[in-house]
Image (cartoon, helix red, strand yellow):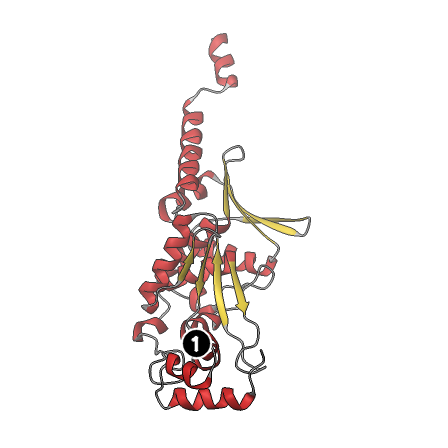
């Protein structure tokens, strides 16, 4: 049943005056959920109309905050709800999607550490959603996000090495791949501009890389020189245990192969 606009306006007035949802519903003959839907952001008991102030330290680009940005760049998504209250209002949130629960927890812990806010976690679907308006607005300052448009902002590119290393670690955990057969670490993306910035960031950390492609519209950044793979492992590495173990096995394999005499050396030895 469609509720008349005058009744909705009366419900809003009652909510502003401090009436409880159940009392409004009883007085106006409507369901309590209907009252909540139309008045949830009003009244002294509601926090939805109150703009929460960010902690003072949240404005600073720290290593922890840089990791949040890296996760959103790699597997993030901007979600806008259907219009509510009026046609111009949409609730915007940020989502981080990943199948690895360790990375989901790391993202959520970082949000709590920086903003003092507990993001909504959905392990069944593999996502963490940031809904608080002030937090979303702060993170959107470092956008854009999305597979084709992501970038690394100046606040991170020009930051100290700890901040840049943490960004690389989180981005590599979400997007990186360790190939034992090719002895390399690879990151694939359709965003050439973003990869070029990533390449410069690695170079600033003493790690050489190269970008190949495009292959079916995507580019691949590779860290393949043994000294650079070793430096990546020693200074950055992965939080993802599977990737970390794969990288360790890769380096162990390189080390063992160097200890084995080559076929050419064996032939020279047999002739002497």
Residue 61 on image: x %, y %: 37, 68
Q: In this view, does 43 lie above or below 205?
A: below
Residue 30 is at least partly visible in this image: yes
Could you tell me which secondary element the residue under label 1 belongs to?
Answer: helix
Left or right: residue 265 versus residue 109 is: right
Residue 162 on image: x %, y %: 35, 58
Tell which of 179 and 224 is nearer to you. Answer: 179
Residue 160 is at least partly visible in this image: no
Q: Is residue 241 above or below residue 119?
A: above
Left or right: residue 107 versus residue 216 is: left
Tell which of 44 and 103 is nearer to you. Answer: 44
* In the image, farthest residue toward the top: 271
**What is the total number of numbered labels drawn onto the structure image?**
1
Q: Where, by quadrant of the figure, is residue 139 drawn?
A: bottom left
Residue at 51% in and 56% down = 75
Say which quadrant the N terminus sits in: bottom right
Residue 199 on image: x %, y %: 51, 55
Q: Is residue 213 above or below residue 73?
A: above
List the residue tagged with mark 1.
32
Q: Where, by quadrant of the figure, is residue 19 drawn?
A: bottom left
Q: In this view, does 265 lie above or below 141?
A: above
Residue at 45% in and 74% down = 33
Residue 258 on image: x %, y %: 43, 27
Mark 1 residue crowding within 10 angstroms, few (<14) / some (14–19) / many (20+): some
């Amino acid at each position: 049943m469609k509720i008349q606009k005058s009744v909705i306006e009366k419900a809003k007035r009652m909510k502003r005056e401090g009436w409880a949802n159940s009392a409004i519903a009883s007085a106006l003959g409507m369901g309590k959920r209907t009252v909540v839907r139309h008045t949830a952001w009003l009244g002294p008991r509601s926090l939805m109309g109150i703009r929460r102030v960010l902690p003072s330290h949240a404005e600073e680009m720290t290593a922890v905050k840089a990791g949040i940005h890296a996760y959103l760049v790699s597997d993030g998504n901007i979600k806008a709800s259907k219009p509510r209250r009026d046609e111009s209002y949409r609730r915007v949130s940020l989502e981080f999607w990943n199948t690895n629960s360790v990375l989901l927890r790391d993202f959520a812990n970082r949000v709590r550490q920086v903003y003092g806010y507990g993001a909504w976690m959905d392990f069944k679907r593999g996502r963490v959603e940031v809904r608080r308006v002030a937090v979303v607005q702060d993170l959107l300052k470092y956008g854009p996000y999305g597979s084709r448009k992501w970038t690394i902002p100046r606040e991170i590119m020009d930051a100290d090495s700890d901040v840049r290393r943490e960004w690389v670690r989180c981005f590599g955990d979400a997007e990186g791949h360790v190939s034992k057969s090719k002895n390399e670490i690879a990151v694939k993306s359709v965003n050439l501009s973003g990869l070029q910035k990533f390449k410069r960031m690695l170079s600033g950390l003493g790690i050489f890389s190269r970008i190949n492609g495009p292959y079916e519209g995507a580019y691949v950044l590779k860290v393949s020189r043994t000294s650079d793979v070793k430096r990546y492992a020693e200074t950055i590495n992965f939080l993802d245990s599977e990737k970390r173990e794969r990288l360790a096995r890769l380096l162990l394999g390189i080390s063992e192969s160097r200890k084995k005499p080559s076929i050419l050396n064996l032939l020279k030895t047999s002739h002497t």
